């Protein structure tokens, strides 16, 4: 049940991000659903491994390297998922910060 709640909230946040951040756009709602699922899969399966592998550089940058990794994921998803586009580095950073902040809050509350 928690996963479904997280999925719905992340999908809603992605839709809003597509509306307010210039450079992030979704053509269809199906693209929003696919990106939300991909983000949750990444968060569940791959992020713990990356957190361990990038621990030294995260310590040196006081955690800011995690923002770069999340922005890279956000941009990479725009390359592989049709009808979803991110127009550059700044929109990718802004979108990833908002998504992963909301996801972190949802994980704490649910």
Image: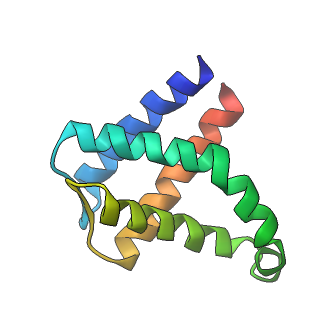
Name, please, the residue furthest toward the left.
27
- Quadrant assignment for the N terminus: top right
Q: Position of residue 85 (x, y in %)?
A: 25, 62
Q: Quadrant of residue 10?
A: top left
**At x 39% / y 67%, what residue is drawn?**
75
Q: Where is residue 50 in the image (x, y as percent from the top left)?
A: 71, 64
**At x 66% / y 75%, what residue is drawn?**
65
Position above or below: 21 against 107: below
Q: Where is residue 39 in the image (x, y as percent from the top left)?
A: 49, 48
Tally of numbered discs? 0
The answer to whether residue 30 is left or right of residue 53 is left
Q: In which quarter of the image is residue 16?
A: top left
The answer to whether residue 36 is left or right of residue 68 is left
- Quadrant assignment for the C terminus: top right
The answer to whether residue 37 is left or right of residue 87 is right
**At x 78% / y 70%, what residue is drawn?**
53
**At x 52% / y 23%, what residue is drawn?**
5
The answer to whether residue 25 is left or right of residue 95 is left
In this figure, which colouring scheme has been used for the structure?
Answer: rainbow
Closer-to-camera residue (31/19):
31
Position above or below: 74 against 107: below
């Amino acid at each position: 049940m928690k996963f479904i709640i997280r999925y719905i909230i992340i999908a809603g946040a992605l839709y809003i991000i597509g509306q307010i951040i210039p450079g992030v756009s979704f053509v269809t709602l199906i693209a929003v659903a696919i990106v939300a699922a991909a983000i949750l899969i990444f968060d569940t399966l791959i992020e713990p491994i990356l957190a361990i592998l990038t621990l030294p550089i995260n310590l040196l940058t006081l955690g800011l390297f995690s923002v770069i990794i999340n922005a890279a994921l956000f941009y990479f998803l725009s390359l592989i998922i049709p009808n979803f586009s991110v127009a550059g580095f700044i929109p990718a950073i802004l979108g990833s910060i908002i998504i992963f902040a909301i996801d972190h809050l949802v994980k704490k509350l649910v």
